[in-house]
Amino acid sequence: MHEATQTRPRQDPANGNKRSNSGAKRLGAGAAAEQAKAQLLELTGHPAESVSSLSRTREGWRIALEVVELERIPRTTDILASYVVLLDDDGELMAYERMARYFRNEVGPTVDPARYTHARRRAAGLQRHRAASAARQPDRST
């Protein structure tokens, strides 16, 4: 009888990515958060102030980021926004959406779960479209 052995992915210290046993790279949590921050900064022009949640999905990563959209004096009246960023396993942006806006002195944003589900459906559709497009590409390796 053979014992089942589990091998853990090796960490690539240079970029925070993990390598599976087949050698393919998988984006690690830290690298996913940094990639989401960079993508959101590029798209909105506002740097992320914090990561409020991060979770692995079947398609990649779901990262919630808090962003200061308007600085005011006093700081308690700053306007913040909560964004959800969806990345695939390679760190490519699949979708992003502003889920809520709120004042810094508020307890926190109220996010409608239906909006998150809508973003996931759009991202899944985009991923299916990319896969179908890749399947239609002629093989140019010959």
Image: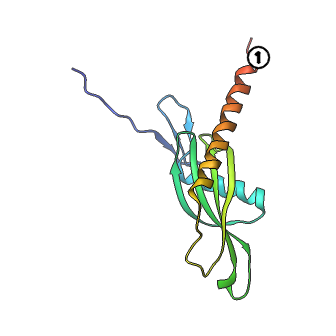
User: At which x and y percent is residue 72?
Assistant: 74, 83
Asked where in the image residue 103 lies, by quadrant, the reply is bottom right
Q: How is the image coloured?
A: rainbow
The residue shown at (35%, 34%) is 6
Q: Is residue 114 left or right of residue 21?
A: right
Circle 1 is placed at which residue position?
138
Q: Which residue is at the front of the view, 26 or 13? A: 26
The C terminus, quarter of image: top right
User: At which x and y percent is residue 46?
Assistant: 74, 66
The N terminus, quarter of image: top left
Q: Residue furthest left?
A: 1
Going by the numbered disc 1, the residue's amino acid type is Pro
Q: Is residue 13 left or right of residue 65?
A: left
The residue shown at (69%, 79%) is 78
How many residues crowd mark 1 within 10 Å: few (<14), some (14–19), many (20+)?
few
Asked where in the image residue 139 lies, by quadrant, the reply is top right
